[in-house]
Image (cartoon, helix red, strand yellow):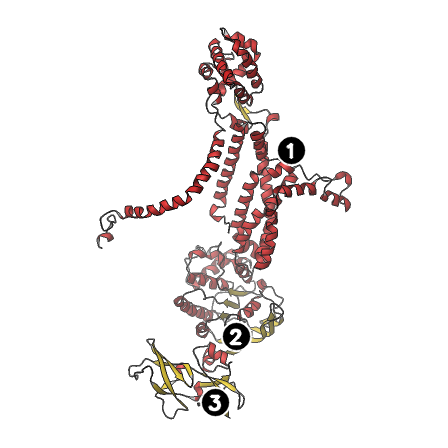
Amino acid sequence: MKKGVGDLMPSNRGASVRYENVQKSYDGEILVVKNLNLDIPPGEFLTMLGPSGSGKTTCLMMLAGFEPATHGEIFLNDRPINNVPPHKRGIGMVFQNYALFPHMSVAENLAFPLQVRNVGKAEQEEKVKRALEMVELGDFGNRRPAQLSGGQQQRVAVARALVFDPELVLMDEPLGALDKQLREQMQYEIKHIHENLGVTVVYVTHDQTEALTMSDRVAVFNDGVIQQLSTPDSLYEDPQNSFVAQFIGENNKLSGKVIGVSGNECLVELDDGTQLKADKVNVNAVGDRTTLSLRPERVEFEPASSMENLVQGRIEELIYLGDHIRVRMSVAGNDEFIVKVRNRGERRKLETGETVPIGWAINDCKALDAVA
Amino acid sequence: MSETATEQVLTTKDGRPLKASLARALRREKLRALVLIAPLLIFVLLTFVAPIADMLFRSVENSIVEDTLPQTVNALQDWDPSSGEVPGEPVFAALAADLQVAVDLKTHTRLGSRLNYEKTGISSLFRKTGRRVKKMTEPPYKEQFLKADKKWGQVDTWQTLKQFSPRYTDGYFLSSLDAERTSEGLQMKPEDEQIYLLLFGRTMMLSIAITVSCLLLGYPIAFLLAQLPLRTSNLLMILVLLPFWTSLLVRTSAWKVLLQQQGVINDFLVWIGLISDANRLVMINNQTGTIIAMTHILLPFMILPLYSVMKTISPTYVRAAKSLGATDWTAFWRVYFPQSVPGIGAGAVLVFILAIGYYITPELVGGTSGIFISNRIAYHISSSLNWGLAAALGTLLLAAVMILFIVYDKIVGIDNVKLG
């Protein structure tokens, strides 16, 4: 049996991918990807997350073989693939607009990768049938892609990328064209397919929710550099720099200067003179400028007096959002300070214009690099 | 309201049927649209549809015989050409009466030239007889006519007259198809008189050859243009369109300079020693010349629809095919090419239809073996003045194009033709 032809069955096989010192420039003047080093173990769901122009799609295209790396080497199962053409890499790929061939039926689309691999007719049919059942489109084989809804097209695209049993599947913003509800549903479906098949998935998106929902690990890209590579929870809880803190989830910024360091904590004086204690993450010494990062849901009203950070804030605006109340406050000279209050029955009535005490723990307040 | 939900005819509040109300409401809109297009519609009707309809009508119209010789036509009805005998005295008497009127009006020469298309010699027969007919005042007319010209004593002459006496004729169409109606019925003309079927066939073959060579030359260009970034492709597109901006005559004459036996290409080939001076290639005033020059002229009509269709084919399709394991060629042939077929269809139809009716280029570079049916039509319109035959040829050409178009629709599907 040819390589890459196996069963669409749970098999725990996936390829490993390694980027080594990879750089990419299109025009010889600007580096789009700056010295990328990344190790993806077999079977991992890794998401490349970042704003547009951050280099994430370029990294994916280099892996797929559609863009040559300017410098460095990419390894697939420890084999260098820089000189392997895309069609010999055996990598399944799902494109942003699905790229289903419009002149072929759904079944023909799925059979295409099998035909070019000279798989026997009977086996082709068997595999196509199984792939269609996997994405719950068993009866749609004879339809044209144009006759399917966006979500169905999406599933066909996923099935097509998997039907020839690749060890690695790349997905380039595959859910971008779907509406919100369908997107969420597809996120779970892709996640489950990944869990069942055990293939390695490299997923590119600019949607942080998508990244957090599906991934084993997330690589946050900005400016051609991986800003942070970690699991979704530590990405949110322990951002390593201001960009990640800002990009993942909502975040309050307070800028100031480090005036004291003790172990993992530091004392920061804000620009208006307020002094706060923070977790020392990305500052070095006394005198450094810093940006404090604080999640809106970690701020408490009526804090216990034992809390490390206590300040007064003026309520500027109240937005009712059902499950929580969003409170915009003016705190230490920042009037975009957001606090989320869970909507509990016994909560105290808040009024616009009121000045109230708020507080938070040291661990929830991260001293990160200063943003200009 | 609850009534509207039932199966009754839907009505408005005052009880009129909804459909009628809607039509009334839309009538004003329709009228407005009609008024807006009216000037163009009238212009097109007057300058395009009407002249063409008139021209096409001429291919069957034949009232000249009956208008000029009404009594003769009437008298000839009882005569049977297969009897082998010329008609009797009453017919000659009628002919004398008719001709005397015709000579006064000077219409007998026109009738002569009309019938001369069908049988050579009739033109001079009418002119000759016309000079004598004034003197024929007394019967028996038959003898006097036979004395004026022996041809009045031949069955052929009368047969032609009788055959073309109805107001409508299929004679032009038969001639267009190299056929004729003789006393033995419908049959093909003698081999050495056949010309039009050959010309129709050649026009088709050359048009197909031109279409195919346009496709072969144009497809790679359009493919390249569609792949390049917009700025570069726009620049190259100007080069494609450049021929459009020079006169057709200049371009055709340029081909004469290049292709003739003492021309640039032959000189070059002799100079580099590829051919000897005695064996210079004959590339003009034959079919080769027509194909080369017309391919050049019609190439943009192939490239433009191809380009606009290819531009809409997203490069991700080819990428997807490659990622699924297809080689460059398979990705092109199985994925890219089928999607470019509508462009091929549009380009081919456009080039073929333009080629099949082309006149000026074959006239200039086609010599005798490279001319098209259109050149023959032009000859009958402006030189031989046989408009009826020209009209019949034109009608057949039009019909051929339409039939091809329908066949094309059946095979490729007109829905698959995209101009952009």
Q: Which of B360/B210 is in front?
A: B360
Label 1: which secondary element: loop
Label 2: which secondary element: strand
Please report, as a chain letter, where disc 3 is located. Answer: A
Q: CA distance from mark 2 to mark 3?
A: 28 Å
Q: Amino acid at mark 1?
A: Thr
Q: Is residue A367 left or right of residue B302?
A: left
Q: Is residue A248 left or right of residue A340?
A: right
Disc 1 to disc 2: CB gap under 8 Å: no
Q: Which of A62/A207 is in front?
A: A207
**Are the residues flagged by discs 3 and 1 from a single subunit?**
no
> Residue B248: image x %, image y %?
61, 42
Counting the numbered discs, the total is: 3
Q: Is residue B358 left or right of residue A186?
A: right
Structural crowding at the residue carrying mark 3, measured as other residues with C-alpha within 10 Å and reported as few (<14), some (14–19) or many (≥20):
many
Where the N terminus of chain A falls, by quadrant? bottom right
* Residue located beneath label 3 in the image: A268
* Residue located beneath label 1 in the image: B368
**Res A221 label:** 2
